[in-house]
Amino acid sequence: MSRLDIFINRMVSQRACLNHAAEQTADLPGPVFELGLGNGRTYHHMCEIMPGRDIFVFERAIASHPDSTPPDDHVLLGDVFDTLPAALERFGPTASLIHADLGGHNAQKNVAFARKISPVIEPLLAPGGLMVSSDRMFFTGLTETDLPRDAVPGRCFIYRAG
Ligand code: SAM
C-alpha cells in the first residue's frame, strides 16, 4: 500500500470515527477535548459537527490555519503530560469525547508515546464517553468498540468508558 493510500485511509477514518463519536455522545453534557491541533483540520471538522459543544484544544505550540485556530480561552497550551493532569483537576472525569492525533511519522515512537499517554487520558472520560485515536491505545478500563462502516480498521480506534 502506498503512503498516499495510507494517508487517505487515515483521513477518511478520522472523519468517519469523529462523525460517529459525535453522534454517539451528543447527549453527554461534558466538554470535548482535541489533543494535537496541528494544522487544525480535525479541530475544524469537530467544530462543524458539534456546533453547540465546548471544545478544548491541547497543543504545545499553536501553528494552525487561521480558520482553524481556537479561541485563547479554549486552548490548554503546553505538553499534554502537564496539561492533561491539570485538566483532570479543572474538569474532573467529565469529557464526553476525546480525540487524539498526537503522533508523528515514526510508528515505533508512536506506540511508545501511546503507552505513556494512555493512563493520563483515561481518567478524563465521563461514563459513556468515547475516545477516538489515530493510534492504538493502552487503556485498562476502557473498551475498544466497533468502527463505523466507512472507517478503515487499523487507521483509527474508538474506546468507550463505562
Ligand atoms: N489532527 C491535526 C490536524 O488535523 O491538523 C494534526 C495533528 S498533528 C499530527 C500532531 C500535533 O500534536 C502537533 O501539532 C504537535 O505539536 C502536537 N503534539 C505532539 N505531541 C505533543 C505533546 N506531548 N504535547 C502537546 N502537543 C503535542
Image: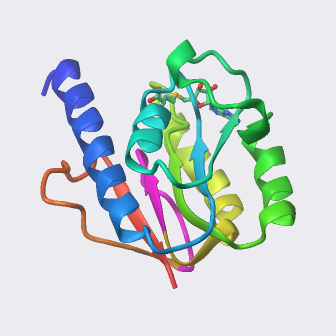
- Is residue 4 shown left or right of residue 132? left
Query: What percent of the width, then of the height, locates residue 147?
Result: 24, 62
* Residue at the spot 43% in from the left edge and 47% down from the top edge: 135
Q: Can residue 79 be seen here?
A: no
- Is residue 67 shown left or right of residue 61? left
Q: Nearer the viewer, residue 150 or 26?
A: 26
- Is residue 6 shown left or right of residue 139? left
Q: Nearer the viewer, residue 143 or 77?
A: 77
Query: What percent of the width, then of the height, locates residue 111?
Result: 50, 46
* Residue at the spot 29% in from the left edge and 43% down from the top edge: 15
* Looking at the image, residue 72 lies above or below residue 84: above
Q: Can residue 151 be seen here?
A: yes
Quadrant position of ligand 1: top right
**Secondary structure character of the magenta stretch overall:** loop
Q: How is the image coloured?
A: rainbow
Q: Give, as a single range, the part of the protein colored magenta.
A: 130-141
* Residue at the spot 25% in from the left edge and 49% down from the top edge: 16
Quadrant position of residue 123 = bottom right
Query: What percent of the width, then of the height, locates residue 124?
Result: 68, 67
Q: Nearer the viewer, residue 58 or 46?
A: 46
Query: What percent of the width, then of the height, locates residue 137?
Result: 49, 58
* Residue at the spot 57% in from the left edge and 18% down from the top edge: 64
**Which residue is outermost to the bottom?**
162
* Looking at the image, residue 152 lies above or below residue 89: above
